[in-house]
Structure formats: structure tokens, C-alpha cells
Image: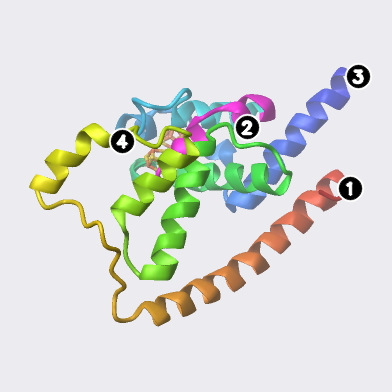
Amino acid sequence: MELLFETAKLKFTRIINQLAENSVEKCYLCGKCTAGCPMAYEMDIQIHQIMRFLKLGEEKVLLKSRAIWQCVGCQTCSSRCPKEVDPASFVDALRVYATLTKQKASERAVEQFNYIFLEIIRHLGRIYEVGLVGLLNIFYMQPFRDIALAPKMVIGGKLNFIPHKIKGSKEIKRIFLACEELAQKDLKAKKELIEKEFQTTF
Ligand code: SF4
Ligand code: SF4
């Protein structure tokens, strides 16, 4: 039984290595990645700890963590890594794995933020802060959550109440479509890889 348990952990590490196209075993846990991470103060587990849990195959700990959704993908950790492990790619791989195996994100607000942000860009070609904040607050079921910030932002000219489309917004839509097509192909291949390892379908 113990052997089976260990095998499942090894399998998880192997899959994430494949999704990240790298090898977590190269990491020697120096912590340089965490020292430079701008989100470290907010994360429940730090990026070098993510690497440690990955080496151990701790799927549950990792998928429950808020950190994998809080990472902003700035790549600072990857650029600082002396072993060229590219830790940011492992965070991406964990998100992909969580999504493809239909596991609930522990930080749903991030998922929601990304969705609303991208939809606004898709339609307007630029960000529309009032719409973004308004829709997020509806998601939180607190429509007046940030209302105290509004007067200062209006005085500082930081808020435009009317959304503006950029001239090339049609081009932006085309870029989105092309990216989605590529992403779908990529996700399909990754899903097949996971299903093959687990010999099941998700
Ligand atoms: S900087 Fe690289 S080697 Fe050091 S802990 Fe982070 S991932 Fe591992
Ligand atoms: S990519 Fe993510 S984990 Fe790496 S430094 Fe940026 S926020 Fe931190």
C-alpha cells in the first residue's frame, strides 16, 4: 500500500516535470527564487517551498495552496535561478494540471479577475478600470466595496466612466482567436499526456 502511495507521488512529479518541460530535481533549494518574488509576502507557501513539495510529489498540498494562483508570472524567480530550473514554468504547469484534472482553484478571485480582465481587453482593446472593479465587486457580492477610493481617483483623473475602444480592436479580437486556437491545441496535448499517465479520462 505504501509503495502504491509513493508511486502515485512520483507519477505526479513526473507529469508536472513534463508539463513544465523541465526537471524539478535540478533545484537545490537555495531560495534565491523566493528572495526575489514580489508576491512572496502574500503567498501561503513560497516558490522554493513549491519546488520542495513538487520534489516530494505532494499534490494535495500544492493544489490546495493559494500561491499557485497568486503568482503573477513575472518570471523574476526564473531569471534569478542559478540552476535554470525556471520555477515560474512549474507554477504554470500546476495551474494547467489543476484545470485539466478539474480541481477547484483555491483562489477563485484570481481566476475571475483573469477572465474579466481578458474579456474587457478582447472587446475594447484596452483596460476599462470601472468595469473591471465593478464586475469584480459583483463577483464578491459587495458592489460598493471600493467606493471610498472613487473620489480620489476621479480627482486624480484616474477613472474614466465611459469605456473607450481602441482603433485596432478588431485586430485584438483576431489575436485572441489565434491565441485561443494555439492554447486549445496545447491543452489537448497536455490533457492526453495526463490521461495516459493516469489511464483515465478527465
Ligand atoms: S532559485 Fe532555482 S535552484 Fe534555487 S530554490 Fe529556486 S528553483 Fe531551486
Ligand atoms: S513568477 Fe510567480 S513565483 Fe516567480 S517571482 Fe513572479 S510572482 Fe513570484
Disc 2 marks a residue whose amino acid type is: Leu
Say which residue appears at 66% left-offset and 46% top-offset.
99
Where is mark 1, residue-wise? 199
Between residue 145 and residue 190, name the one nearer to us: 145
Mark 4 / mark 2, whichever is N-terminal: 4
- When the figure is inspected, residue 34 is found, relative to residue 135, above or below; the finding is above
Disc 2 residue lies near ligand 2 with CB under 8 A = no
Where is mark 4, residue-wise? 38
The magenta segment is 59-73
Where is mark 2, residue-wise? 63
Using the rendered image of the protein, determine whether residue 192 is visible from the camera's viewpoint: yes
Mark 3 / mark 4, whichever is N-terminal: 3
Say which residue appears at 69% left-offset and 38% top-offset.
103
Residue at the farthest left position? 155
Measuring from the top left, give residue 84's x and y in whole percent: 44, 47
Instruction: Name the quarter showing ligand 1.
Output: top left
